[in-house]
Amino acid sequence: MGTKKPTKYDQVRTHLMMGNTISSMEAFNLFRVTRLSAIIHTMKHRDHIDIESKTEQSPDGAYYSRYWISKQWLEMDKQADNG
């Protein structure tokens, strides 16, 4: 058996765990994710990952959310991996 292909959830989680941010458009362009908000909801409520967000405005006036994992949560996760 070959290696299992990462799920959309896994791809977004890995991206965020590396300290990156993501918006819906970026999620679609990078991973073909069409329901980023559902993935973010799962990360927050099932996996208890501290996700932060802010609303931004595109040059054409559209509003969208940008998500990232809090620095504090990332530091705690690093310590847990090292300890």
Image (cartoon, rainbow, N blue to C red):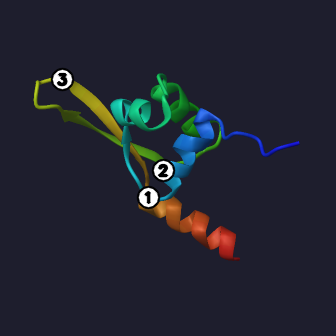
Residue under numbered circle 1: 19
Q: Please name the amino acid that badge 2 sits on.
A: Leu
- x, y percent for residue 54: 29, 40
Which element is circle 2 on?
helix
Answer above or below: position of 37 versus 4. Answer: above
Residue at the image point whose x is 48% and y is 29% from the top: 32
Which of the marked residues, 2 or 3, is nearer the chain's N terminus?
2
Query: Residue 62's mark?
Result: 3
Image quadrant where residue 19 sits: bottom left
Q: Give the camera-side residue of 56 and 49.
A: 56
At which x and y percent is residue 45? 59, 35
At 67% from the left and 69% from the top, the residue drawn is: 81
Q: Callout 1: helix, strand or loop?
A: loop
Q: Quadrant of the C terminus?
A: bottom right
Mark closest to the chain's N terminus, 3 or 1 = 1
Amino acid type, callout 1: Gly
